[in-house]
Amino acid sequence: MKVLGIISEYNPFHYGHLYHLEKSKKITGCNFSIAVMSGSFVQRGEPSFIDKWTKTKIAIDSGIDLVLELPSIFSVQSAELFAYGGVKLLDSLNIVDYISFGSELGELEILKFIAEIFAREPYYFKLMLKKYLDEGNSYSVSRSLALESFLKKDGRNKCNYTNILKSPNNILAIEYLKALYILNSNIKPFTIKRVGSDYKETLFNNKYSSATSIRNKILKGDLKEIKNYLPEATYYHINQYLNEYDSFNTMENYSHILLYLLRTIDKNSLSKIMDIEDGLENRLINYGFKYNNITQIINNTITKRYPKTRIQRILIHLLMGINKDIFLELKNTYPQYIRVLGMNNKGMNILNKIKQNTNISIINKFADYKKENNLQLHKMIYYDKKSTDLYFLGLQKEKSRISNLDYLKSPYIKNSRTNF
């Protein structure tokens, strides 16, 4: 059994994801695959476009064998913490041979070289990082400039590292590699060069259009218009989702809830929320009173140092009540459990292998977590349930505003006779 691990969002699963999955299996020779997938909220600080069970069905029907949920406290974090959460979970299974991820560069050794510098943080690099942060740059820009300065001083600046660090999938790839390095993991990394549109591309233009452009196209028009540009399973299950819930989820759906929170929280409490620093709580509260729409608040709060995705993540942390102390406590004892969202027959074999090789609790039926005499497990899974309830609260139609679905939904099981 050779097992491939993938850390994913699948928001939604598109032809680029299918290309990555199939090529990863072929090159690594893995005949089993696991996806650790973000659930109700995603890394860029937004609700998932479709719910986690629909994403799971699409992933399984498209060739993934086992889908595990990335705990919600890691799913809405910086690239560094998102990657750490996914890699740590895969590593803890003790059965994963390879991890594969996309990158704009597609060259593993250069990405590994950068990752090891970021993991070791040599003295001069840290000095330059502080300098650029003090100048008001964002963390990602400061780190890129610090790397350039460090390599120039070291006489090794023969590659355009600044451009490499401008590409989001390169950044995530580096963070996956850094996490593997820090954990001293035996999992072998592999990167696939991305094909098609950049992930930020908003124009829907080809078979390998970005998830952003696909979401925008679906929101603006008829789903039938892009049937030929989506994998069969994606098109089918998105239609099923619409039949059940009527609408997709967006950040704007939480305007009133977030306005209430920003207008009633005190500055001291807001300053403790994850990702808040340097008086940012004052800006958020001030704009929370000035504007009546969350998009206006976000657009006016962003600065050179605080990009849009960071502000959005802060607002999701506020929504979920995740502060710095809570996150640190749970990170230090992570992982405590594996939450199964779906599998096929091969996935069942993987799960049996995991049971033989890890001492982490495996949660198939959600209610079973209550049987675990483990305070840290209960604390972490509380946020998974909370994120699910908040996700469905954000949907627009009354019949979609349901709660406790973690208890009511079973893992998706696809056997050889299942058709979609």
Image (spheres, grey):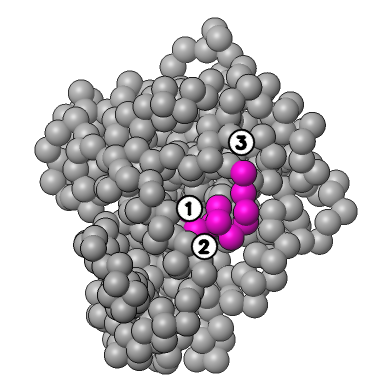
Which badge, 1 or 3, is on the more N-terminal residue? 3
Judge whether residue 14 can be spotted in this image. no
Q: Farthest front residue?
A: 155
Classify 10 Å Cα crowding around label 2: few (below 14), some (14-19), many (20 and above): some
Quadrant of res 301: bottom left
The residue indicated by pointer 3 is 96
Residue found 32% across the figure and 45% down from its top: 107
Which of the two marks, 2 or 1, is nearer to us in this view? 1
- Residue 166 or 251: which is nearer the viewer? 166
**Which kind of residue does numbered mark 3 sit on?**
Val
Which type of secondary structure does the marked residue at label 3 adopt?
loop
The residue indicated by pointer 2 is 81
Q: Work out which quarter of the rendered image holds the N terminus and state it.
A: top right
Residue 282 on image: x %, y %: 40, 91
Q: Farthest top residue?
A: 417
Q: Vertically, is 339 above or below 64?
A: below
The residue indicated by pointer 1 is 176
Tell me, yes or no, whether the highlighted magenta stretch contains residue 266.
no
Residue found 48% across the figure and 53% down from its top: 177
Q: Which residues are magenta?
A: 176-186
